[in-house]
Image (tube, helix red, strand yellow):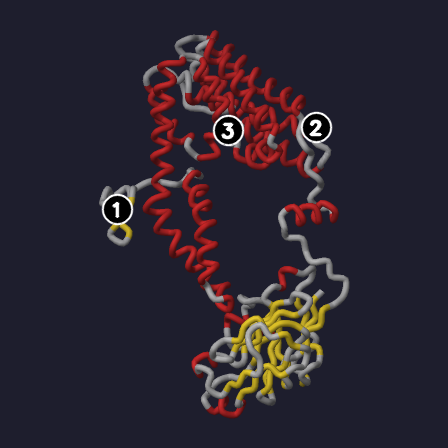
Amino acid sequence: MIESGDPITLFSIPVTPTSYSYSVIPIILMVWIMSYIVKLVDRITPRIVKLILHPTLVILISAPIAIIIVGPLGGIIGDWLAVAIDFLSAKLGFIIVGILAAAFPFIVMTGMHHALTPIGLNAIANGGDTLVFVSQVCSNVAQGGASLAVAVKSKDKDMKQLASASGISALMGITEPALYGVTLKLKRPVVAAAIGAGIGGIIGGLLQVTLYIAQNCLLAIPAFIGEKGMTNFFYGILMIVVSFVAAFILTLIFGFKDQPDSGTEDSRKTADTASGTEKKPLVEKIQILSPATGTVKDISEVPDKTFADKVLGDGAAVIPEEGKIYAPADGTVVSIMDTKHGIMFQTSQGVELLIHIGLETVNLKGKYFTSHVENGAQVKAGDLLVEFDLDAIKAEGYDPITPVVVTNGDDYIRSVNMVKSNDRIEHGECLLTIV
């Protein structure tokens, strides 16, 4: 669409033709905006359909905003950056090489370093680049130096391996693994790398190091050979050595907080706690009783993909023999649908359940259903919740199979286990266990 040159519109609104292949700024901006959209959608979506409707609405609202407004901002900011670098290069001389080299890790994070490539290529076409690719060489080599320093100093086996591999990769011009996996993650090393690159860049600027071929790593060494002869070649090597050594030594001096081995149980607990997703410390099995008398079926056997594919959660199903649904545990009736065919229930131990009486029975609009409790009612296990005319529902052509779904199974150490399948069960007998 962009290459065709034709105008692009969305809902008749003009869309700026911009490529986002290497850009991160639009993503960062849009995720920030989506944090508010998610809160808005969360308030307006009914709990019973939240799992399906919530992300759908978020995407439908967010996509036009991203495509029409937020996305093009990344391209505009990138263009402004290129203009600013061109202006500063003319005004600051050799200092701008050090500034740009130090800033390159953060420019790469936004993907805007690609906006500078045309400037560097134009300089090479006109005799040699002394700014863009020279700065990139300093920055990439410094990232490699910082990562390899982490590999030397870290006591974590996984971090040593990652830092070694990504450090070598950075020396070859691919800095993202080192930047995102090591230096930025550990914080202080990325500062050390930026300072090391800045020092190397100032050296390169003072000595007017020139690149005659577009390169951004150790492979740039032969590209220093050109009109300036071997002097430029040796100056280029000096610049590289200074960038690497400065970043390496500064990383060792600044230090970093070593990451614990991610494979240990203690570190997993720490990570879970830090992220707010610590599993509930259950030491006993929670029993969920059958809300109906009938034949037990595995949830995957329910002839409805939403339940069978466990979109709403894991659980089991009962083919009822009588038209009565009982409380599966002590707890609260969170919500009974207006059509009475669905019950949201929370046990006193925090397990959230959906009891869905029959398939597609929402179409009955409450016909044949009688509720014996109200929303918010506190009940005991075995209390009668809903009665329904089983024979009438069958006569209408509806499948009476009743899924019992644990909608918050991910909150527990081990999710849902069905006690038995294809056996007859009385209401009040154990249907599910949750650990």
The local crowd at label 3, few if under 14, some if 14 to 19, many if 20 or more residues have their Cα within 10 Å, is many
Residue type of the residue flagged with mark 2 = Lys
Whole-percent x, y for residue 285 in the image: 74, 68
Determine whether the residue tagged by mark 2 lies in a helix, strand or loop: helix
Kindly identify which residue carries mark 3.
105
Give the residue furthest to the left.
6
Whole-percent x, y for residue 207 in the image: 47, 9
Whole-percent x, y for residue 259 in the image: 68, 37
Question: As drawn, is 411 to the left or to the right of 341?
Answer: right
Point 32% across, 17% down: residue: 126
Kindly identify which residue carries mark 1.
14
The disc placed on residue 153 is: 2
Question: As drawn, is 209 to the left or to the right of 386?
Answer: left
Q: Earlier in the sequence, mark 1 or mark 3?
A: 1
Residue type of the residue flagged with mark 1 = Pro
Whole-percent x, y for residue 178 in the image: 57, 33
Above or below, 418 against 394 in this view is: above
